[in-house]
Structures are given as structure tokens and as C-alpha cells.
Amino acid sequence: MNGSCLCGAVRYQIAGPLQMMIHCHCSMCRKHHGSAFATFVAAPLAGYKLTNGADHIVGYQSSPNGQRSFCRVCGSAAPSVAKDMDMVFCPAGNLEGDLDMRPTAHYFVGSKAPWHEITDSLPQYVEYPPEFGIGGVERPVPAAKEGCVTGSCLCGDVAFEVTGAPTRSAHCHCTRCRRGRSAAHASNFFYALTQFSFIRGEGSITDYRVPEARFFAVAFCNRCGGAAPRISRERGLVVVPAGILDSDPGCGPAAHIFVGSKANWYDITDSLPQYVEMP
């Protein structure tokens, strides 16, 4: 199997067999990917080969025992190498083509986003499954701010607030969103420019625009690779990745869009409206 980042600078190959596929809802995964959850596949380390872009990969130490990697150009998550386990963990959203495996469980549902409901029948674990013999990492929870919804990147360098309800929202399954957010889909809230303000870190954001796209772009913190809000002045709005919100917006994405490009390994099980492309 082949995988790549959104801009194509980082490319790799994985030789199976794939050994597991899981959805992770921990706050670090949500902030790194910007979506409701991240999805990883595990494969033997011996079958992993980075074919291009080693000089484009940046690492961020997200916990005492964990490091996250991302492309410094487009922010897509890169595979995580676990030498002690002789395994590589790859974000499924960046693997090309159909996969012959399906997710088997939800991890860290104790940290699940309040706006996201799990509607499938897969097993759920508050943290790791008991047989792993390890626990999660304690992370500070930012204090809520009355009258607004706040958010921040994984490392906290970027922070912002929004007021009022989003003008629209959606889970997007297009190939660009899946690759850009390294997830099953992007989960975005759209706010008017007048509803949004930075608390800190606007200068720490890298904005990557797909060259051939009219509007599509992603924004990320250049220190941790975590998703960040993107200001689209030409449309008069701000695109906020839902996974980086620190407080409850009181609503969730209202629809699934571009389901005609959906990953074959992800099943939509909720009752939200579905559109083949845009509504």
C-alpha cells in the first residue's frame, strides 16, 4: 500500500498484513487531526519504507512517551514508528485506494468530543483496552469562557474564540479533506469573520493551499502540526476544525458531504443528511 501527505512531498509504502485498525478519540488525536477522531492502522515495521520527503517531516513530542510527526508544508500527519513494538502506525486517511480492513474499536471514548455521537456497534474503551496494561496521559482542560466557544492547537501556541452559532457545518469526506486531516473525514464549523478572534498565535500558523484548488486549503500550527483555524477572506468566513474546540459549541456538524469520495473502510451510521458532493 502507498500513502502520502496532502502536498505529496512525503510518500511511503506499507507491506501488510495490516494488524489492526482503530478510531482514537483522545484530545491529542482530535487536536492533531482536527476531526472528531483519528483512525490508525498498524503494520509490521519491516514492511514500512519512507520513499520520499524525510527532510519534510517534523516531529513534536506530544507526551513523555509519544511523538507525532507531520509534513512541514501541508501539515498532514506522518506514520509513527514504534521500534519497541516492531510496528508502524499509519493514519488511514493518507493511505491510497481501498483497504481490505475495517475499524475494530473506539479508544479513549472518555475523551470523546461532546458534539460527536458514536452510533456504530464497535467495542468502546474509556482509554486503552485493559490488556494493553497502560493508561492515558493527563492533560489540562482549558477553563470555559462565558459567552464564547474557545479552541487551541495541540501544543497550545494557537488559541482563539468564537461567538454565536456557526453559519454552517459538515463532515467532509472528499479526498483532499481525508488526506489533509489524515482522518476518515474532516469535521468543520464555519463562522463569519466577525464571530472569530485570535487569543494568541496567529503568526504560528502555516497556511497551505492546494495549487489547483479554487478555495481548498488547510491551516496548522508549525510547532505541533495541530489543526488550526483558517481565515478565508475571499469568502468572508473562518473554517474551524471541530476537533480543536476546547468547549462545547452546543451543536455538531449538520451533514456529511462528498460521500461519493468516502473511504471504503468507513461506514456512516448516524442519521445526518448525506450528499454525494456539495448540497
Image (cartoon, grey):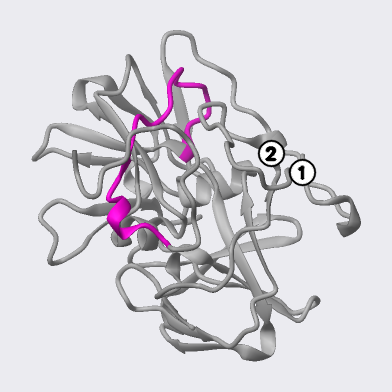
- Asked if residue 252 is among those painted magenta in the image, a careful observer would answer yes
* Magenta-highlighted residues: 243-263
Residue at 40% in and 78% down: 10
Per the picture, the main secondary structure of the magenta-coloured stretch is: loop
Q: Position of residue 166 (x, y in %)?
A: 30, 23
User: Is residue 206 visible in this depiction of the protein?
Assistant: no
Kind of residue at disc 1: Tyr
Q: Residue 109 shows which numbered tag?
A: 2
Query: Picture coordinates of residue 174 (x, y %)?
Result: 30, 56
Quadrant the C terminus occupies: top left
At x 21% / y 49%, what residue is drawn? 277
Q: In this image, 192 relative to 11: left or right?
A: left
Which image quadrant for residue 62? bottom right
Would you call the spot at circle 2 few (<14 residues within 10 Å), some (14-19), or many (20 or more)? some
From the top left corner, tell me how far across and down residue 224 is, in percent: 51, 55
Marking on residue 74:
none
Q: Where does residue 230 sit, x and y in percent of width and height? A: 28, 43
Residues marked 1 and 2 touching at CB (< 8 Å): yes
Residue drawn at x 67%, y 57% as measured from the top left: 104
The secondary structure type at the circle numbered 1 is loop
Q: Looking at the image, which is closer to me, 119 or 88?
A: 119
Q: In the figure, is residue 219 to the left or right of 130?
A: left
Q: Secondary structure at mark 2?
A: helix
Question: Label 1: few (<14), some or many (≥20) within 10 Å?
Answer: some
What residue sits right under mark 1 in the picture? Answer: 125
Residue 106 sits inside the magenta stretch? no
How far separated are the C-alphas under marks 1 and 2? 6 Å
